[in-house]
Image (spheres, rainbow, N blue to C red):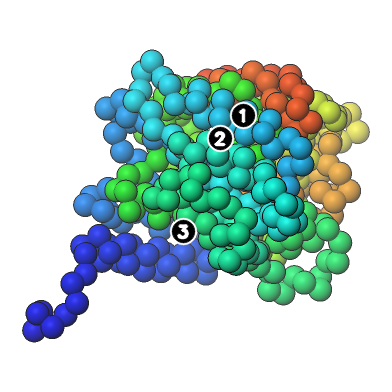
Amino acid sequence: MSRFLPSVPPLAVRVVFYAIVSILVLKWDQVSLNFSEDRYDQVVLEGGWGANLGGGLRLDEGMGVEGRDCKIGVILIGKSDLGDKGQLYANRINQTLSSLSTSPKYKITVNAYISSNFPRDECKKPIHSVSLQTIADTIKSYIKGIVLTDSTPQEINYCFNKSRVPNDTILHRSRSLPKIPGLENLLKTTRGLRADAGSGPQWFRLKYAWDYLEEREIVQGISYDVVLKLRLDETPQPLSSTVMCDIVVDSRKGLKPRALYAMSDHAFWGPRNIFKISAKISDNLSWFLHKYKRSGSRPFGVSALLRSFLSAHPWTFQKFPKYWYKNKLATLWVPDTRENKNSEPWTSETIIKGIKYLYCQNKTYITPGETGAPKMLAGPLAAEVDQKGGLYAGEPAFIEWNHAHNISMCEFGGGMEWLEDKRGFKVEQPTYSGDQGCRMFDYSDICSVSR
């Protein structure tokens, strides 16, 4: 009977099988999220990835970092029209990837994935010196994939000179940014949760790049230990792969907390199994914001929230421009446990004091509005849009998504000392690192002194 069947390479069978498994898991993720107190550390986005795939390889654990191999996946996101600064950005990105590729401690592999929109207007120019092609040329030794939205294969072939990048390491894909069902008529402004407005595009582009990163892992039989998200036009400098890989090793030993290392949504990184929670935002953000649409209603892990505040650099709680590249903790709705609101000002110190109180009362996970839950109040730097709640998919929603998964938002660290911004300027960007930038603590550390 088998002689009448077509010959199918074993690799093809594996790829099809893994694709089917991934689709099933994704569907389960979308319909079965549960943030109940007894499951906050095993929500479906986390628990759905436990199966052994690829000959025993666990995709949420990575490979070999203990043996001094460390694989880093870099996702680059941004608009394709970078004006006359395309080469500047390309050089900076290349510098970052090059610095990440060396370590005195680990054997480093760095692969990059770009997710952007199709540069249709630039492709109409007589000379095809488009920004994305410039970046692809400059970092071609690192690129494993480019995902473009709203394009056709004919346009891609016309616009891009594929001969300048290895055909076996790059894949152009035609994807469209979707409109989220049920939200088109709710908000007409750019504040709405739409793929083509506000903060929406980056989450869809992140998903597309992540999907392809996972496919490449399966085909190549590898798993990244660290995943890093950067913008095309803003580059933190310098970065240390040794620091990042050390954190992965310590995390697997239980010496580091569940944390994402971030400068808000501008750039963030973490162990693969933590990063994937943020990579799945676009699949679930509509559900999350609809379910917890009321201001101050979003659930959170108490220890995750406390660690985020305790680890934050002082600039986090200062006004623009200091807090611009910091996690927007002071804009969140947070527990208000003040006994005397007239005598206690609403500051970061007061907020931290209140979260400590909840932690010492053995509160592990809180869903505001439920019986016994504390009252919530908008943070001292909350803008009008932050105070209203609703469906705005901005920076606070990114932090709340992670806190709901009991993931702390720690300082970016990673060896960074400054940021090269979209104007081409070097911007001072102090950040804590190590234990100071992501605090480890237990009950005795926090609760030795009663309130």
As measured in the structure, the alpha-carbon distance from the residue carrying label 2 to the one carrying label 3 is 39 Å
Residue located farthest toward the front when viewing the structure as drawn: 126
Residue located farthest toward the right when viewing the structure as drawn: 342
The residue carrying mark 2 is: 138
The residue carrying mark 3 is: 44
Q: Amino acid at mark 1?
A: Asn
Residue at image location 38% in from the left, 28% down from the top:
108
Disc 1 vs disc 2: Cβ atoms closer than 8 Å? yes
The residue carrying mark 1 is: 91
Disc 2 vs disc 3: Cβ atoms closer than 8 Å? no
Name the front one of labels 2 and 3. 2
Along the viewing direction, whichever of 309 and 20 lies nearer the viewer: 20
Residue 437: % across, % down: 59, 23
Question: Is tag 1's residue or tag 3's residue first in the polypeptide sequence?
Answer: 3
Q: Quadrant of the C terminus?
A: top right
Q: Quadrant of the N terminus?
A: bottom left
The 10 Å Cα crowd at callout 2, few under 14, some 14 to 19, many 20 or more, is many
Q: Is residue 315 left or right of residue 90?
A: right
Q: Amino acid at mark 2?
A: Thr
